[in-house]
Amino acid sequence: MKKLCSCKGEFISHAAEMELNMINAIIVAGGQTIKGLEEAGNKALYSINGRAMIEYVIDAVRMADDVQKVIVVGPKNSLDKHLKGKIDALIDSDGSVMENVMAGISYLGDDNYILICTCDIPLITVEAVNDFITKAKVLGADLCYPIVEKELNDKKYSGMERTYVKIKEGQFTGGNIFYVNPKTVKENYSFAEKLIVYRKKPIKMARLLSFNFMIKFLMGKVTIDMVEKKFSEITGISGRAVISLYPEIGQDVDKSCDVYAATGYLNSRE
């Protein structure tokens, strides 16, 4: 009898541990449009191969091993009929990216880590998401952000234009997914908002970390470790870069040419 109780206790303990390891996901789907296809409206609903672009993201995130809840934040009146039954909740918000992120955090709470994704990465795969989450958990930082080497990106997705940053380790582009401790987002809202605004403007991003840091960056003397340490020094947040071997994690669809390229790549998978 004691053995049975012990096993039951171990099972409950394991279940609780599994629950603690689970994370929630926010997919941001504001009213942004695709450059050159503005008349199509919200890019989240732009049809690629007969499916709304956001559906590819939802599928990859929902199938990820450690993701518990998946919510979408965006204008409910346009998204609701397309996403009903495919997500755990749709939070009505049509603000900036950061305002939408905060709306998602307010709904989910700040007890568990959160995965934040944009709606415009239709090439994303569950393997890419799982790899990123696994590596981020090992690092144990407040904020983890994926980066992909230019050589790898060009080899697999040469038709997709990306912004690259040159550092000592090579040339890298950033992803469109974040692993974060939601408490730190609340505490550093204004800085986080600037990071979002400048995410495709490397020089302005470097300037946020200080003028001297920007000069070192322009001279090519910055390393990944230096960026992480400077970021932590300024914000008090432990931030780590995750080198991803899955370039689809950063292939966002911003322009009409991106749509045509993404469509071709998705067709090649079938």
Image (cartoon, helix red, strand yellow):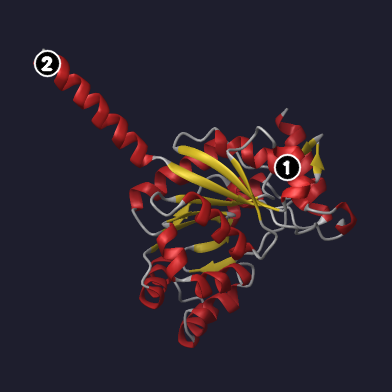
Q: Is residue 56 above or below residue 255?
A: above
Q: Which residue is mark 1?
A: 80
- Is residue 142 something that shows in the picture? yes
Q: Which mark is residue 3?
A: 2
Q: Quadrant of the C terminus?
A: top right
SS type, badge 1: helix
Residue placed most toward the observer, 255 or 91: 91
Name the side, left or right, on which 235 lies relative to 146: left
Tell me if label 2 and label 1 are in contact, CB under 8 Å.
no
Q: CA distance from mark 2 to mark 1?
A: 50 Å
Q: Give me the residue at 90% from left, 56% from top.
A: 39
- Is residue 265 something that shows in the picture? no
Look at label 1 and name its amino acid. Asp
Q: Give me the residue at 50% from left, 69% from top.
A: 167
Residue placed most toward the observer, 145 or 172: 145
Name the side, left or right, on which 148 lies relative to 224: right
